[in-house]
Amino acid sequence: MSLPKPIKVAQFGLGPIGIASLQLLAKKNWVEIVGGIDIRPELIGKSLSEVVGDASVGDAKVYESFEELALLHEVDAVVHTAGSRATVSFEQIRPMLEKGIAVVSSCEELLYPALRAPKETAEIDELCQTTGGRVLGTGVNPGFVLDVMPAFLSGACASVAGVYGERVVDASTRRQPLQKKVGSGLDPAVFKALAAEGKAGHAGFKESLALLANALGWEIGSITETIEPVIAQKPIRTAFFSVDPGQTAGLHQIVTAETNEGYKIHLDLKMYLDAESPHDTIRLDSNPPIEATVTTGIAGDVATVAALVNAIPSLLEAPAGVRLMTDLCVPRCRHNLPSTQPALELIS
């Protein structure tokens, strides 16, 4: 029996996460990779297998723009991994949404884009209502650990008065861009200055809190955010950075908010090189009380890519518009489909 008709997927952005996304997409029998999009001249025209260094990815080509790719290929969905800012990402994906395509993005601010870009979010949602397009921001954090997971746990509660979330990440195990983003090797004063300018730190943390508050039906006031450097106490060497004692090894970032009724959300992130005892903990002040810990933490790079790929069928099933993770069905791993279940039945 022949395989079912697959979902035709293009990859926008061929950095480390984009390449890892292609490698996972290539393992799914419900996906057909139809091309990649990247502005780097040295990649345009090459096959994705050559760019990725993995024959299983296939011989679809790299194009300079979505418009060029769409002239030659039908596209059902795009995985977008090229930036952290909602306004920039909306402009990048607008041509896809104009054609009614579903876009799953790792852009942190797209997790809850109305927080920082309310006007643009409303405009894009209106566009999608006309064309049938859909857009979703997701990932491991933001997108799962400190927002979707506590919202999911609250489903077993009669009431919730507070949420505490804690994530400790050993950044030594992560890709170079993330180690740079947390300030590895910087003078602490330099890190603080960059953080104050929004040029360092974990993007999307306020969005996690906003999504969680929205899911709980809480109206919060302003969100308070603090970012401090974690100082290296000993020499640290990774594949990408050498950090001396007294230099920045990473960050400690906190976001908090409270409703007029006194309901509170407190999210705490420590992400630094050689962090001890990585873990993810969620504690609900609830009835019944709930506390859950992933004792080793959820490995970020793999989980980010998995979240993007696994969300594609759910987004295709969702109504058109700017969608939130809490709009979709429960996140789950999407293994290969049996030949009796056509992939595109998911969106019919």
Image (cartoon, helix red, strand yellow):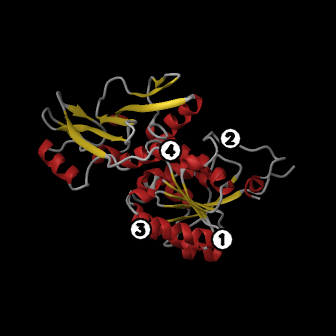
Count residues near mark 1 (Cα–Cα under 10 Å), then give few for <14, some for 14-19, many for 20+.
few
User: Nearer the viewer's eye, disc 2 or disc 3?
Assistant: 2
Q: What's the CA distance linking mark 4 and mark 2?
A: 33 Å
Any mark on residue 40, and which?
3
Q: Earlier in the sequence, mark 1 or mark 3?
A: 3
Any mark on residue 335, and which?
2
User: Nearer the viewer's eye, disc 4 or disc 1?
Assistant: 4
In the picture of the structure, the residue carrying the numbered disc 4 is: 217
Q: What's the CA distance linking mark 4 and mark 1?
A: 42 Å
> For the point 37% across and 42% down, which residue is it?
260
In the picture of the structure, the residue carrying the numbered disc 1 is: 73
Any mark on residue 272, and which?
none
Count residues near mark 3 (Cα–Cα under 10 Å), then give few for <14, some for 14-19, many for 20+.
few
- Image position, residue 64 (x, y; %): 48, 72
Contact check, label 3 and label 4, Cβ < 8 Å: no
- Image position, residue 274 (x, y; %): 29, 29
Q: What's the CA distance linking mark 3 and mark 4?
A: 43 Å
Counting every numbered tag in the picture gives 4
Q: Is residue 256 left or right of residue 215?
A: left
The type of residue carrying mark 2 is His
Q: Earlier in the sequence, mark 2 or mark 1?
A: 1
Quadrant hosting residue 240: top left
User: Nearer the viewer's eye, disc 1 or disc 3?
Assistant: 1
- Dot 2: element: loop
Q: What's the CA distance linking mark 2 and mark 1?
A: 25 Å
Please state which of residues 46 and 247 is positioned toward the viewer in this rendering: 247
The type of residue carrying mark 4 is Gly
Please state which of residues 229 and 14 is positioned toward the viewer in this rendering: 229
